[in-house]
Amino acid sequence: MTNDRLVRLRPQAVMENQPKSSSESPSKMMSGTSEAKRLAASLLQKHGMSGAKTTALDETIKAQKARDYYQLSIWREVRQLLETQQEKPS
């Protein structure tokens, strides 16, 4: 089997290991959201809004380069939470 063939099969293999529906793994879905909220709050406390957004962007890029799709989804959500918080009037 060539490397090209392995690359083409990999996404399907990954999808086969995923839950069939959101009802099969609600705790996993909630844990990602909880983790993103916790990370966003921690970054804001440590770095302020500008530093938090910079750190979240850096971590998003690292996760993307590493092809760590779980971490990528978490850091994207952190960035979205930070953007939402910035849009709210004080």
Image (cartoon, rainbow, N blue to C red):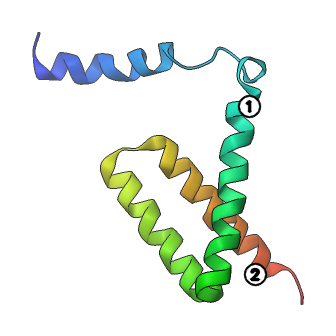
Structural crowding at the residue carrying mark 1, measured as other residues with C-alpha within 10 Å and reported as few (<14), some (14–19) or many (≥20)? few
For disc 2, the marked residue is: 86
| Tag in front: 1 or 2 | 1
Using the image, determine if residue 40 lies above or below residue 36: below
> Residue at 61% across / 75% down in the picture?
43
Looking at the rendered image, the quarter that the C terminus falls into is: bottom right
Amino acid at the residue labelled 1: Ser
> Residue at 72% across / 60% down in the picture?
37
Numbered badge on residue 27:
1
Using the image, determine if residue 72 lies above or below residue 79: above
Looking at the rendered image, the quarter that the N terminus falls into is: top left
Q: Position of residue 69 (x, y in %)?
A: 46, 42
Q: Position of residue 18 (x, y in %)?
A: 55, 20
Asked whether, in this view, residue 78 is left or right of residue 89, the answer is left
Determine the image quadrant of residue 61: bottom left
Amino acid at the residue labelled 2: Gln
Using the image, determine if residue 1 lies above or below residue 86: above
Q: Position of residue 2 (x, y in %)?
A: 10, 16
Asked whether, in this view, residue 44 is left or right of residue 60, the answer is right
Q: Position of residue 21 (x, y in %)?
A: 71, 18
Using the image, determine if residue 62 lies above or below residue 88: above
Structural crowding at the residue carrying mark 2, measured as other residues with C-alpha within 10 Å and reported as few (<14), some (14–19) or many (≥20)? few
Which label's residue is closer to the chain start, 1 or 2?
1
> Residue at 28% across / 20% down in the picture?
8
Element class at badge 1: helix
Asked whether, in this view, residue 3 is left or right of residue 69, the answer is left
